[in-house]
Amino acid sequence: MSKIKNRTEIQFEFPINCSANILFTYLSTSTGLEEWFAKKVVNKTIGNFEFHFDDDTITKAKLIKKTPNKMVRFQWEDAPEGEFMEIEIITDELTEDVAIKIHEHCSEEEKNSLIDLWHSQLETLRHALGS
């Protein structure tokens, strides 16, 4: 974990029983993200997304980096400079097992609730994938 302006970058990894190709669609498209991440996701213009969550909040993010079948990185509109949310697909070369590695930023007070939220979201993703 590293610090950015009194905020912490957290990283954790989750195994996912799915091909990287299929998984990438769930991470990089509005329809895929709606299956597990937010109630509604609108791709307003190329790379500019609007996330509508269950509590009726709307958050905007820009897709700042995308490597097919490898990773996506979003920068939230209201996030401090240098902060991002990154989801990386990791494929073990020997076993071909697939995992997701999450990179996220938060305050120390938000850390536990953010980790719990990610665990819940990724269980929803596993269910959507049927894994």
Image: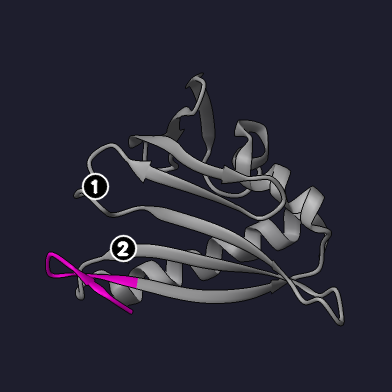
How far across and how far down the image is residue 33, in percent? 60, 42
Q: Which residues are magenta?
A: 1-9
In the image, residue 2 sits, relative to residue 71, either above or below, namely below
Which residue appears at 52% of the width and 24% of the height? Answer: 43
| Lateral position of residue 120 relative to residue 113, left or right | right
Q: Looking at the image, which is closer to me, 37 or 47? A: 47
Residue 42 badge: none
Q: Secondary structure at mark 2?
A: strand
Q: Looking at the image, tell me whether mark 1 or mark 2 is earlier in sequence order.
A: 1
Image-quadrant location for residue 77: top left
CA separation in Å, label 1 and label 2 = 9 Å
Does residue 69 show up magenta in the picture?
A: no
Proximity of marks 1 and 2: CB atoms separated by less than 8 Å: yes
Residue at (38% x, 63% y) in the render: 104
In the picture as drawn, the residue positioned furthest to the top comes out as: 45
Amino acid type of the residue tagged 1 in the rendering: Ala
* Direction left: furthest residue: 6
Left or right: where 7 falls relative to 105: left
Residue 19, picture quadrant: bottom right
Local packing at callout 2 (Cα closer than 10 Å; few below 14, some 14-19, many 20+) is many
Is residue 72 shown above or below 99?
A: above
Report the residue marked by disc 1: 79
Q: Residue at x 30, y 73 (%)?
A: 111
Residue placed at 80% from the left, 50% from the top?
A: 21
Q: State the quadrant of the C terminus.
A: bottom right
Q: How many marks?
A: 2
Q: Amino acid at mark 2?
A: His
Residue for badge 2: 105
Secondary structure of the residue carrying tag 1 is: loop
